[in-house]
Amino acid sequence: MQLATRGRRFRNPGARCRIGHASRGQGRQTCSSQDQEAEISGGKAHESRIPPVKGTARSPSPRKPFLSPEQVIHLETLQLFAGLIGVGVFAQWLASRLKIPAIILFLAFGLILGPVLGWLRPQQIFGDLLSPMISLAVGLILFEGGLSLKFHEVKRLGRPLLRLIVGGLVLSFGLTTLAAHFLAGFSWATASVTGAILVVTGPTVIKPLLRQAGLHRRPARLLKWEGIVNDPFGAILAVLALEASLFFSEGAESLHYHPFSIPFRLLGSIVIGCFTAWFLAKAMDRRWIPEHLKAPGILAAVVIVFAASDLLFPEAGLLAVTFMGIVFANLDSANVEDVRKFKEEIATLLVPMLFLVLSSKLQWQALAGLSLGAFSFILAVIFVIRPLSIGTALWNSGLPKADRLLIAWIAPRGIVAAAVAGAFEPKLTAAGYQDAEFLVPVMFAIVLLTVLLHGLSIRPLAQKLGLASKQGDGLLLVGCSRWSIHFASTLQQAGCPVVMVDQNWRDASQARLAGLEVYYGDVLNEEVLDDLPLERLGWALTATTDDAYNALASRQLTKVVGREQSLQLPPHDAAFAEKAEKHLLGTVVWPAKASYPNLAARYWSGDRLKSTKLSENYPWTTFRADHPNALVFFLVRDGRLEPLTTETEVPPEGRLVYLAEKNPPAPRNQP
């Protein structure tokens, strides 16, 4: 009698067993005898009736796997989600440090994790669920984009906006369809679907680029409206082109929508979105929805509206949620801002995840298989069709030439174009249009090139055309009192640009007479905030007599310049300062003696705001010895502003802006 270890044959009277190895640690053992057979599958014995042999060691039982196949799949899905979120947030942080558009890093990381390393394979994990998940995520992003569209912007933009959305869409569709047919050699069916898909520019790309570039308000608004509104209309136009292509193909099954029913279905989707937004706003205002369920309730409503509208007509869900966001944003509801903040945070997570998935699905072989005509078509879309269609649409519209040039160049395509192309390709191929297999590679190439070219060129081009600030570190000073006007003048002399705003006409006029850039209005008003040159401002300081207004204004300006850059004078009311929560105030960096009453009293008693240059011959220690009672506010260095606190380590060079005592001692060694 012989016994052998795993992987060998062993003999036992009346029994013969053979144990083999399987992949990934799974083995299969079959034992046969006259009256018994035992089977071991997956490394675990179901039952073995082979009697142990006396005097010999029992064969070691196979080890139980640490995870079952179902648990392995679960962990892969969990790790994929965690990895996408982590990489997306890291890419945005790295982009902010490198001062480049985050979209470029999203695509770069996706290409590295997907085609290069092969770690990111979302199609294998999600399967058929991937496409609806992407569509739903795009719907949430479009709703969030709709929340940023205000009707008062339409009045301000007027004819250029209408021409851009309507004329630009029609011309772009026609020219792209012709180019796809004659340059790329596509059939008219595939060419029309391609032309419809490429009319979209995509809010998933436009909004991050606008945030990064710091454009002036007018071109930024036009690009924002075009990207958000044209996205659902472009997707629906692609559905109509697909429907027509399937209808005229031989033996293809059409989507079976009667032509006369399509307008009513689209109108029904818009009505569903608008009515839902109105109902939710009223329900929140009347407190039918508890406070802790408002944001989740809106999220659930967006998902339901998206799914219900897609039942009426394919891609109509995008149209419904876009109008839902626009209507909700323009209703006079106190809950809009809370919902907008919640949706911005969701969009911040969804956009990088979508682009990581998009770029990870790219196949190099598909791009390499494109013909010379296809590459000619791609270049024509970027360098010829977009400038020609937008230039024609905006001709004689009253828009300045610089604005027209910038808008005619900037048209990055995003996740909607790639997702729609991926969904329509198999339908066209099944209908007999074999050239549709090149639809996805062409779309991926256009997405990659437009994101790279437009993402890297938008800010330099805008600066060259005078449509973006070369320096976005100015200060918005709220409150035009006598001392604050002197304060703004001193800052400008030190090299920091200042913009003042006040809702008191007389005080604003005094600042204008002093040669300062000043705006009349209340910063709590969205329309007034839209008029301010925020692209040139990196800091804000609320310095009025009312501590409560300073707090409200600082919170309003937080969404423009960030929380750390939205400064507020220390409250002069001790009770107010103690009771007020820190998150309800702006950032307070100076001591209590810098409150408005103390500053005004010192100013009227003879103290003056001054600027002094620090150097090796006149360092900070010498300055503090010369001015022990001076209240230092800022250090201006190379045009950049830095508030000084008791904990700040003062650099050796720069200009100090401070409130000096009335009769300071004679300065020593000051240049």
Image (spheres, rainbow, N blue to C red):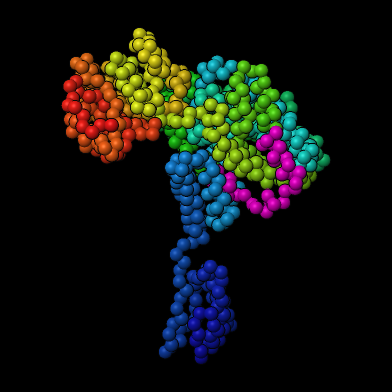
Whether residue 65 can be seen here: yes
Task: Looking at this view, name the residue that lies furthest to the top.
Answer: 506
x then y, percent, for residue 542: 32, 22
x then y, percent, for residue 201: 61, 33
> Which residue is rendered at x = 45% and y = 40% of the image?
96
x then y, percent, for residue 243: 73, 34
> Which residue is rendered at x = 60% and y = 47% of the image?
128
Q: From what the image shows, is residue 276 above or below residue 112?
A: above
> Which residue is rendered at x = 50% and y = 79% of the image?
6
> Which residue is more in the foreground, 404 or 226?
404
> Which residue is rendered at x = 62% and y = 42% of the image?
449
Q: Which quadrant of the view contains residue 440? A: top right
The C terminus lies in quadrant: top left
User: What is the chief secondary structure element of the magenta stretch?
Assistant: helix
Inspect the magenta stretch and tell me whether residue 258 lies in it.
Answer: no
In magenta, the rendered stretch is: 355-384
Task: Looking at this view, name the residue that lies furthest to the bottom.
Answer: 1
x then y, percent, for residue 461: 56, 32
> Which residue is more in the foreground, 563 or 244?
563
Q: Which quadrant of the view contains residue 559? A: top left
Direction from residue 654 to residue 32 in the image, left or right: right
